[in-house]
């Protein structure tokens, strides 16, 4: 699946769950964008992917290292272990951010903000790059958005979920990665979700309905479906009846 469609599917997942999670306003906007970014995050195992190209050679080198550790493209980062590692990393960055000193309810500058700010900048920039917004200016927009989010602490808002309270940053990461893996499971490639225990590639569709990345079916069926559904989900999540 193309980066563009992965980002849209991440955004759609968060927007569709928005009313259930009771997320509105600026938290909804931050959640939709960061989940769109997390929707391309698992492809950080490929140096030519959208997310790997976000910050040039820095992220491409990181992607090369991730590919070595995770067994290559569409392996470890496209499994349950991958979702758990990305979510745990986001949770840790959020915890560290939460321990920063505060001024009148907003974050004061502190090194405690740096991991979450860098992570958010990566997600926002990757999301904008994936949907072809802004080019290099999109990266600057992503960095600006990350600074605003850290300052206002929108990413730390606690979402009630099955008796737990999960920070938006970690929930968006988990949902985006899960949407990515589901998207790749619609293609002929599939995903080894039980890696490293099993290399078996799982699919969500029978072979006849699976599609190949970047072929006409993705542009003429998947992309319009995702775009239309995202518009409807955002409309509904912002309090309008369907
Ligand atoms: Zn992928």
Image: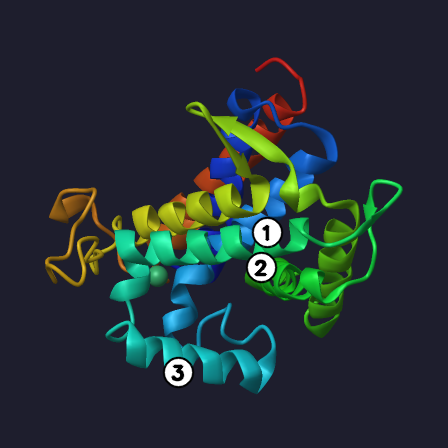
Left or right of 101 in this view: 123? left
Give how far apart the Cα atoms at labels 2 and 3 are: 18 Å
Q: Earlier in the sequence, mark 2 or mark 3?
A: 3
Q: How many marks do you count on the picture? A: 3
Q: Earlier in the sequence, mark 1 or mark 2?
A: 1
Element at badge 2? helix
Left or right of 212 in this view: 228? right
Instruction: Please tell me which residue lies in front, 209 or 127.
Output: 127
Instruction: Please tell me which residue lies in front, 64 or 126.
Output: 64
**What residue does disc 1 label?**
94
Q: Residue at x 70, y 42 (%)?
A: 154
Asked which colour scheme the image uses, the reply is rainbow
Picture quarter with the N terminus: bottom left
Q: Is residue 88 above or below residue 67?
A: above
Residue contact between numbered discs 2 and 3, judged by CB atoms under 8 Å: no
Q: Residue at x 39, y 61 (%)?
A: 42
**What residue does disc 2 label?**
123
CA neighbours of label 3 inside 10 A, class few (<14), some (14 to 19), many (20+)? some
């Amino acid at each position: 699946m193309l980066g563009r469609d992965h980002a849209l599917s991440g955004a759609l997942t968060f927007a569709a769950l928005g009313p259930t999670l009771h997320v509105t306003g600026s938290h909804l906007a931050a959640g939709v964008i960061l989940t769109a970014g997390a929707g391309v995050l698992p492809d950080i195992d490929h140096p030519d992917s959208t997310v790997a190209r976000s910050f040039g050679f820095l992220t491409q080198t990181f992607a090369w290292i991730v590919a070595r550790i995770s067994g290559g493209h569409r392996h470890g980062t496209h499994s349950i272990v991958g979702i758990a590692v990305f979510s745990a990393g986001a949770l840790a960055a959020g915890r560290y951010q939460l321990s920063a000193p505060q001024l009148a309810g907003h974050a004061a500058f502190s090194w405690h903000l740096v991991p979450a700010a860098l992570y958010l900048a990566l997600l926002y920039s990757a999301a904008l790059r994936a949907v072809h917004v802004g080019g290099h200016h999109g990266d600057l927009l992503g960095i600006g958005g990350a600074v605003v989010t850290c300052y206002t602490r929108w990413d730390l808002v606690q979402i009630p979920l099955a008796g737990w309270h999960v920070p938006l940053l970690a929930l968006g990461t988990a949902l985006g990665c899960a949407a990515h893996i589901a998207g790749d499971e619609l293609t002929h490639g599939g995903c080894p979700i039980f890696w490293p225990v099993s290399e078996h590639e799982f699919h969500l569709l029978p072979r006849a309905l699976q599609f190949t990345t970047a072929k006409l079916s993705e542009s003429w069926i998947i992309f319009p479906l995702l775009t239309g559904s995202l518009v409807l989900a955002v409309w509904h999540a912002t309090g309008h009846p369907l």
